[in-house]
Image (cartoon, helix red, strand yellow):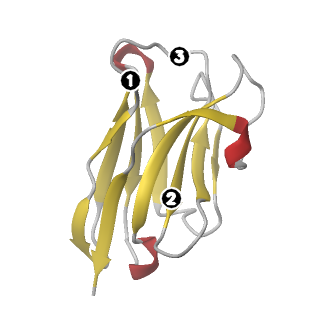
């Protein structure tokens, strides 16, 4: 099972780094994504990274503030979040995109078939 960590309480303008690992499971051939779900809202796409880390894709709301990266040797994907805003408050989920060595990155949750348990990020004023 994917294990997300790194969430917590941070002031607006601050930074956090989320990690998501899959002990005992290798996903080096799959694209990976981060999604988030705020209270009372639907889950939304945040960022994705290709299997070889050559391509990344961000939601407009986080572009320029968040950076997705991965370490295939550690079976871990990261989300570096900077200049956090109140509206970034949500539970953040990592996910594995369906298929192997996919040339494209998806923003639809239906394209992902393996999800972590989520980690809560709370941004305060």
Q: Please, what secondary structure does the residue beneath circle 1 have?
A: loop
Residue at screen point 29% across, 57% down: 16
* Nearer to us: label 3 or label 2: 2
Is label 3 in contact with label 1 (beta carbons under 8 Å)?
no
Question: In the orientation shown, which residue stands out farthest toward the bottom?
Answer: 125
Q: Under tag 3, what secondary structure?
A: loop
In the picture, the disc for residue 10 is: none
In depth, the one of 88 and 119 nearer the eye is: 119
* CA–CA distance in space, label 2 to label 1: 19 Å
Q: Nearer the viewer, mark 3 or mark 1?
A: 1
Q: Which residue is mark 2?
A: 36
76 vs 62: above or below:
above
Tag of residue 28: 3
Disc 1 packing (10 Å; few <14; some 14–19; many ≥20): some
Which of marks 2 and 3 precedes in the sequence?
3
The quadrant in which residue 45 appears is bottom right
Q: Position of residue 62 (x, y in %)?
A: 54, 64
Q: Residue at x 47, y 63 (%)?
A: 65
- What SS does tag 2 mark? strand
Question: How far is disc 3 from disc 1 in space, using C-alphas?
Answer: 11 Å
């Amino acid at each position: 099972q994917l294990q997300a960590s790194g969430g917590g309480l941070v002031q607006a303008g601050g930074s956090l780094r989320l990690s998501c690992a899959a002990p005992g499971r290798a996903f080096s051939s799959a694209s990976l994504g981060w999604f988030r779900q705020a209270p009372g809202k639907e889950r939304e796409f945040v960022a994705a990274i290709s299997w070889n880390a050559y391509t990344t894709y961000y939601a407009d709301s986080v572009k320029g503030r968040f950076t997705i990266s991965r370490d295939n040797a550690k079976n871990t994907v990261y989300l570096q979040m900077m200049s956090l805003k109140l509206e970034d408050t949500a539970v953040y989920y990592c996910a594995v995109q369906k298929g192997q060595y996919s040339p494209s990155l998806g923003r639809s949750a239906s394209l992902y078939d393996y999800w972590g348990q989520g980690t809560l990020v709370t941004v305060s004023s």
